[in-house]
Amino acid sequence: MRYIEPHGHMVSRVTDDYVDMATAGCAAVCEPAFWAGFDRSSADGFHDYFCQLTEHEPKRAAKFGIPHFCWLCINPKESEDVQLAKDVIALIPDFLDKPNVLGIGEIGLNKNSRNELKILELHVDLAARHNQLILVHTPHLEDKLKGTRLILDVLKSDRRIRPERVIIDHVEEHTIGPVLDAGFWAGMTLYPESKCTPARAIDMLETYGTERIWMNSACDWGVSIPLAVPRTALEMKKRQWTADAIDRVVYQNPLKFLSQTPKFRV
């Protein structure tokens, strides 16, 4: 089997996870900037984090034969401090020419607050000005539908944004339709305790088709499974999906989206 892990927070994982992913056929891993489990206190901390994503983690992944790519932003969980967020966003242009940087992400909303919306708009503007791909985080649980609608409004209100260059992640049964209907890509996050189980993800694929959809593990320091994508592929096989259809979802789809930037090569 071959697959791409399009959303994995590898700085929080151990080297055994890289070994397992390589053994399972991982052709590339893409790491969005995210919340570290605590709120960072200064832009200097983010500068070091961006150096880790663009310089150090690719070297660690390369030891196991896996190309490592990343996305840069300040996560919505840390966007309430508007001045800090502005300072962090000001750092990002200096990193955009790094060979493994795919775009801006994972931006979006957490509690759907005004400050989060303001920083989301600044991120979208940054991506538009620098012609970057965008990866969007949608809120969890009961705030997901409202947050998804707010995110769609922000993206659709900026005429510079091309929907086919935006992936809206963590979709569930009640949000995947509006995302796809608006022309954006949809990401399904495979978690053991929240977001989307393999069975639910396959149900959505069988309901909505396989166009403009990818699956990811979003593995981080919390309860998550780095091999969630290949495990779900095995469940698809049990449901009589063909090898070509499985390959389309776990490999060809992320390849198609990510190849919109010339930096992505597998």
Image: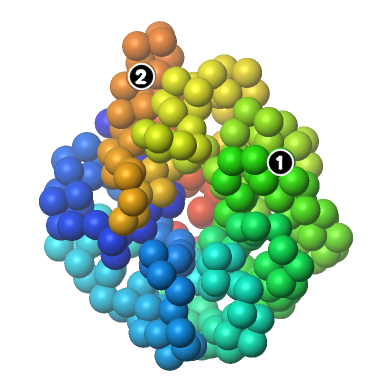
Identify the residue under disc 1: 145
Mark with earlier residue (1, 2): 1
Q: In the rendered image, which quarter is residue 92 located in? A: bottom right
Q: What residue is rendered at 13% in x and 51% in y?
A: 16
Residue 249, image x, y percentages: 47, 32
Residue 76, image x, y percentages: 58, 65
Q: Is residue 72 above or below residue 46?
A: above
Identify the disc placed on residue 184.
Answer: none
Q: In the rendered image, which quarter is residue 204 located in? A: top right
- Image quadrant containing the N terminus: top left
User: Which of the pair 119/237 is nearer the observer?
Assistant: 119
Label 1 sits on a secondary structure element that is helix
Identify the disc placed on residue 235.
Answer: 2
Q: Is residue 173 visible?
A: yes
* Type of amino acid at the residue the image marks with label 2: Glu
Question: Label 2 crowding class (10 Å Cα cut-off): few <14, some 14-19, many 20+?
Answer: some
Q: What residue is rendered at 32% in x and 45% in y?
A: 223
User: Which of the pair 229/174 is nearer the observer?
Assistant: 174
User: Which of the pair 63/174 is nearer the observer?
Assistant: 174
Q: What residue is rendered at 32% in x and 77% in y?
A: 52
Residue 217, image x, y percentages: 39, 43
